[in-house]
Structures are given as C-alpha cells and as structure tokens.
Image (spheres, rainbow, N blue to C red):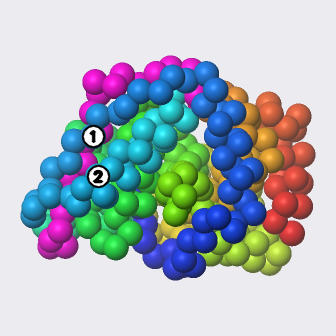
Amino acid sequence: MKNLDKPKQPPKVAATSKECPFLLVVFLFLLSNTNLQAQKLIVNADNGKMAWHDTAMLNRLIRYEAYIYNGFFDKQIPDSLPVVINLYKSRKQFLAVRDAQNAVITKTGFYSTRSRQCFIYQSNEYINVTVHEVSHFLMHYHNYYGVPNWINEGMAEFFEGLYINEKNAIYVDQQTGRLQKLKSYISNGELDLVKFLGPEMSSWSNKQDIELKYNVAYGIIYFIIKTHPEYIKQILTSLKNGESSTTALANCYGSFQFFASRFNAFYR
Ligand SMILES: [Zn+2]
C-alpha cells in the first residue's frame, strides 16, 4: 500500500548525491549470489498503453528489485511468474477498484494479496509507486505467511527511491522528508520503538498515525541498510521463523537496547 500524504520529495540529483555510491555497493554485495534473468512484466492499461520508455525503465527497476529480494531470501523468483500491473489513467476508475478491494488508505496504488497484482493510478509519480507496490509483491512471494508492516512498508518505501540517472545507472534516492520527520519524533521524545515494533502497532488499517508509521518504518530500514545491510537478510530470516521484531533486531545487534541506542544516535 502506498500512502501519498508524505512530504514532497526534492528533485532527484543523481550523480552528485554522496549516498548513492555506498548504496550501489550495498546492492552489488546483496546481488552477488543471484543470477541475472528478466522478470516478466504484464501491464494492463485502462486507456492506451504505457509509454515505451516507461516500460523499459520499469522493466529494469523491477528486475533489479527482484534480484535483491532473491538475495535476501536465497531463493530465485521464477522468471515465468509475471509481475502484473493494472494501470489506471482514470482516477475515478482507480478509486472504484480501490474501494471494491478495501484498500482505503491509498490515493495512488496498492498491491492485492488476493489476486497478487498491483493496481496503480497513473499519477506523475507512478513509476516510483509501481516499484513500491512491486516490493510488496516480491515480499509476498518470498514470505507467504507475512512479515510485520514496518518491514514490509519500510522496504517498499526504500525501493521507491530507485531510479535511473542520466548516465543510465540505477541509484537509490533517500526520502529526506521522512527522515526529517523521524528526527523530530526522536528529538521530541515522541517515538517509543518497543511499542512501534510491538503487536499493538501490527494493524495499519486505520489512518491514525499512519504518516508516523511510514516515516519510522522507512527510517529503520534506511538506518540498517546504511550501517549493516547484511542484517536485513538476517532479520527477514528471523521473522520468517516466527520471531518477534524486537527479537529479530536483538539477534543482529546483541540486544534490542543496543539497536535502539544506535538508531537514536544515527538520527540525532
Ligand atoms: Zn506499501
């Protein structure tokens, strides 16, 4: 699910960002034990077709995203399994489909676990939204019994930053607005990480605090990928084995308290 009430992103500045080379290295590391095949993309558009350059870009970004998930789970998604994207130029039609499937929060896109398809409104940001929703498709494929929302949405928000720069290379942009909000929660003492990761925050179906949930979820994933990308794989494995989020983090960091102290220091 994609909520769109987030702060507007500044324009992407590919080659000059200091974050990008690091993240590229991270992903090359994660990709090291996967092989390079293409993921099939099926686009059902309600009004004409997707522009060829958008199709080419999405194919590339989704293939890249699929490789990373293959690495996280040590399992290759079959190339024959298509990524189905239902694209709506008509906002009215998109909202009708959304309401019929009870995807109430989103204004721009959602992933249906029932049909295993993505439903996207063709806004100006629809490429990013599609990459976000395809992250849910890939997570669902690899971890059928589900992962907590914070990691599912945090990863999707992270992948949403994927783009192709003017040198035709894939980079990850950071969501500065979300990180700024997260810093303010921490400095104002408004964030209780144990509560955030606990069972009482497991439902994201109501709109209360939804912005905070996305900001914190993204911030946790961003922190881990920036500092210990290899932990993502360990955390996903722990969660898949039925361990709680706090235990999964403690397994990586030695204790949950140590994770929390590093996290808070990172955003100080
Ligand atoms: Zn989402």
Residue at x-position 88% and y-position 34%? 254
Q: Quadrant of the N terminus?
A: bottom left
Is 77 covered by the magenta stretch?
Answer: yes
Q: Secondary structure at mark 2?
A: helix
The quadrant holding residue 252 is top right
Question: For the residue carrying disc 2, how many other residues have a C-alpha within 10 Å: few (<14), some (14-19), or many (20+)?
Answer: some
The percent position of residue 187, horizontal first and vertical second, equals: 82, 75
Q: Label 2 amino acid?
A: Thr
State whether residue 87 is above or below residue 183: above
Indicate left or right for 72 with 194 as reference: left
Residue at x-position 19% and y-position 73%? 91
Of the pair 263 and 41, the residue shown nearer to us: 41
Sooner in the amino-acid sequence: mark 2 or mark 1 = 1
Asked if the beta carbon under badge 1 is closer than 8 A to the nearest atom of ligand 1, the reply is no
The percent position of residue 248, horizontal first and vertical second, equals: 72, 34
Instruction: State how many labels appear.
Output: 2
State whether residue 59 is above or below residue 46: above
The percent position of residue 114, horizontal first and vertical second, equals: 26, 39
Give the labeled residue for mark 1.
Answer: 41
| Residue 103 seen in render | no
Q: Label 1 amino acid?
A: Leu
